[in-house]
């Protein structure tokens, strides 16, 4: 690994079904290492067990999930992330569903999903690059002006750097008797603080998905 690599040394492309094994490995490494100072071993184990590429099948099949790789290593996935025009892409049991409501883009956000960066490739702007691509792709698809996501505690600084603000921090259940803190974050293009507060009151979430 060349630590002097910059963004021009990487390429972003839509993920494919063939990327699933590499994505699973990326998810495991990112969660296990980047979350270890913020969550318990049990919480991390649960997150790893739930974070599989199959969770994003709908996004992958619709070309709304992306991967980043070094220019000369197209199968070496070092970062990933996607977006979806609905708030739910999978059921509580983890199976994906396409039968969820689609929001009015003028009233509701596009959802940023599953942003992961390999620990060896952190602090290079890869996470920000994927978030920006997701926002741009969502706005091309529909005239979204608001973007939302659920974040683990360790990832909050990344999203703040992308212009997101914390709307709410609370605990969600991850397994029997085990809960973990997550943050709901959002970004509204060109909004004033008063408009943001009004939006926060109007958007009611059934639950927070952390990825």
Image (cartoon, rainbow, N blue to C red):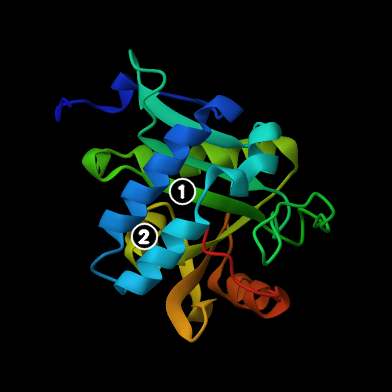
Q: Is residue 74 left or right of residue 96?
A: left
For the N terminus, which image quadrant?
Answer: top left
Q: Residues within 10 Å of mark 1 (few under 14, many from 20)?
A: many
> Compared with residue 11, is residue 62 higher up or lower down, i.e. above or below?
below
Report the disc number at residue 115: 1
Residue at which label 2 appears: 155
> Disc 2, disc 1: CB below 8 Å?
yes
* Circle 1 SS class: strand
User: In the picture, residue 195 is in which quadrant?
Assistant: bottom right
State the image coordinates of residue 135 (x, y, percent, origin top left): 57, 43
Residue at (38, 64) in percent of width and height: 45
State the image coordinates of residue 11 (x, y, percent, origin top left): 41, 22
Q: Nearer the viewer, residue 91 or 6?
A: 91
Residue 128 visible in image: no
User: In the picture, residue 126 is in which quadrant?
Assistant: top left
Residue at (66, 72) in percent of width and height: 199
> Compared with residue 176, is residue 30 higher up or lower down, i.e. above or below?
above
Residue at (42, 57) in percent of width and height: 48
For this orientation, the residue located farthest to the top is: 72
Q: Residues within 10 Å of mark 2 (few under 14, many from 20)?
A: some
Number of numbered discs present?
2
Q: Nearer the viewer, residue 37 or 199?
A: 37
* Circle 2 SS class: helix
State the image coordinates of residue 211 (x, y, percent, origin top left): 53, 57
> Compared with residue 122, is residue 37 higher up or lower down, i.e. above or below?
below
Q: Is residue 88 left or right of residue 188?
A: right
State the image coordinates of residue 32 (x, y, percent, origin top left): 31, 57
Residue 114 visible in image: yes
Residue at (22, 40) in percent of width and height: 120
| Measured Cα–Cα span from mark 2 to mark 1 | 9 Å
């Amino acid at each position: 690994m060349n630590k002097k690599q910059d963004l021009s040394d990487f390429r972003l492309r839509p993920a494919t079904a063939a990327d699933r094994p590499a994505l699973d490995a990326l998810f495991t490494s990112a969660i296990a290492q980047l979350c270890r100072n913020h969550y318990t071993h049990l919480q991390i184990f649960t997150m790893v067990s739930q974070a599989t590429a199959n969770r994003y099948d709908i996004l992958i099949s619709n070309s709304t999930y992306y991967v980043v790789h070094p220019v000369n290593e197209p199968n070496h996935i070092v970062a990933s992330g996607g977006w979806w025009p609905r708030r739910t892409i999978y059921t509580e049991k983890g199976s994906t569903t396409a039968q969820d409501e689609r929001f009015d883009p003028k009233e509701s956000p596009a959802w940023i999903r599953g942003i992961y960066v390999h620990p060896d490739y952190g602090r290079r702007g890869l996470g920000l690059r994927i978030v920006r691509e997701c926002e741009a792709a969502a706005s091309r698809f529909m005239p979204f002006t608001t973007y939302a996501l659920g974040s683990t505690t360790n990832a909050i600084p990344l999203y703040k750097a992308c212009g997101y603000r914390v709307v709410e921090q609370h605990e969600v259940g991850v397994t029997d008797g085990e809960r973990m803190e997550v943050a709901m974050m959002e970004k509204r293009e060109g909004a004033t603080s008063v408009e943001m507060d009004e939006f926060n009151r109007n958007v009611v979430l059934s639950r927070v998905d952390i990825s």
